[in-house]
């Protein structure tokens, strides 16, 4: 099964959520591959998002197919260094080569509609080509409802399935607006939140991180895994 992880923007906690799902699946005995098709803002040899996924979840079946030094959209970052960017169909082809795993997690760069190539392809196009459900990560603060609604509307327009909505980087002392976002986001998504990951989860040791993942995402997502591998339950549809 393939699950695409995207966000409502940059810096919402996609990598930590990806690691949490990978940790939960591996804890249930599933074989897991994690792909970050394009990594931006890093030079060769520097640690990227997949290093954090490995550190937190223990997953070591990791795949990165393009890396650009400028912290820009992949299409723009590739142009800056004169490299032909990866096309969405190329990404989809490479992900399909991993489909003998129980679960393949594909983490996008930035938000749902960030451009991957000169044709304007995005991680949404990758998800469509793969017929994959999409796990959306959003932030807890101001602008959350609008950004999330726009992301879900764009998914619905493209016929993409919502595999769950997660709030990343939840603070220890949320303000009133953040607390209200819990119920309001469920209304926007037309389904309960899949989980809320606390701020600082990305610096925990693996054992503590797994415990946090079980507590934060396990009630909603944990039942989709068993000792035999990944069970196909990512079938929730996006509604109006």
Image (cartoon, grey):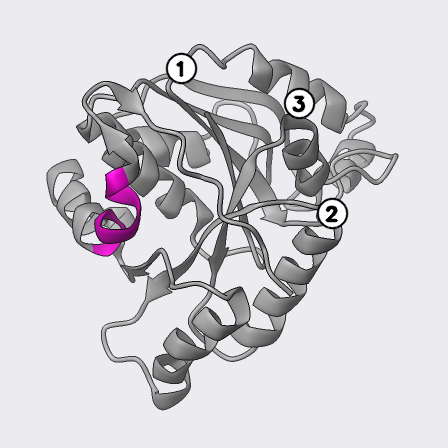
Q: Looking at the rendered structure, which numbered label has been put on residue 209?
A: none
Q: Quadrant of the C terminus?
A: bottom right
Look at the numbered disc 2 and give the secondary structure of its residue. loop
**Which region of the structure is painted magenta?**
216-223
Residue 47 visible, this orientation: no
Provide residue 109's location: percent of width, then percent of height.
60, 42
Provide residue 24's location: percent of width, then percent of height.
24, 36
Residue 83 visible, this orientation: yes
Q: Nearer the viewer, residue 36 or 43?
A: 36
Residue 217 included in the magenta stretch of the image: yes
Mark 1 neighbour class, 10 Å CA radius: few under 14, some 14 to 19, many 20 or more: some
User: Image height check: is 214 above or below 33?
Assistant: below
Q: Looking at the rendered structure, which numbered label has been put on residue 158?
A: 2
Provide residue 164's location: percent of width, then percent of height.
44, 51
In contact (CB < 8 Å): disc 2 and disc 1: no
| Nearer the camera: disc 2 or disc 3 | 2
Kindly identify which residue carries mark 3: 91
| Nearer the camera: disc 2 or disc 1 | 2
Look at the numbered disc 3 and give the secondary structure of its residue. helix
Kindly identify which residue carries mark 1: 101
The residue sitting at 74% across, 36% down in the picture is: 116
The residue sitting at 49% across, 74% down in the picture is: 187
Instruction: Report how far apart the C-alphas of labels 2 and 3 lie in the structure.
Output: 18 Å
Instruction: Report how far apart the C-alphas of labels 3 and 1 lie in the structure.
Output: 17 Å
User: Image height check: is 221 above or below 26?
Assistant: below
């Amino acid at each position: 099964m393939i699950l695409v992880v995207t966000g409502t923007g940059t810096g919402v906690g996609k990598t930590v959520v990806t690691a949490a799902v990978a940790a939960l699946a591996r804890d249930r005995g599933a074989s897991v591959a994690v792909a970050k098709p394009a990594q931006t803002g890093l030079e060769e040899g520097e640690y990227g998002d997949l290093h954090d996924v490995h550190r937190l979840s223990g997953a070591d079946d990791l795949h990165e197919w393009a890396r650009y030094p400028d912290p820009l959209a992949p299409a723009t970052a590739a142009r800056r260094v004169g490299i032909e960017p990866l096309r969405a169909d190329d990404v989809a082809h490479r992900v399909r080569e991993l489909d003998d795993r129980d679960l393949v997690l594909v983490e996008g760069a930035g938000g749902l509609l960030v451009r991957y190539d000169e044709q304007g392809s995005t991680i949404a196009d990758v998800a469509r080509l793969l017929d994959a459900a999409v796990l959306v990560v959003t932030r807890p603060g101001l602008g959350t409802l609008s950004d999330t609604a726009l992301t879900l509307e764009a998914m619905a327009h493209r016929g993409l399935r919502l595999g769950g909505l997660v709030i990343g980087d939840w603070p220890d002392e949320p303000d009133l607006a953040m607390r209200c976002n819990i119920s309001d986001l469920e209304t926007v998504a037309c389904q309960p939140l899949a989980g809320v990951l606390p701020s600082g989860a990305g610096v925990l040791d693996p054992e503590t991180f797994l415990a946090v993942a079980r507590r934060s995402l396990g009630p909603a997502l944990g039942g989709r895994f068993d000792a035999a591998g990944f069970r196909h339950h990512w079938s929730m549809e996006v509604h109006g």
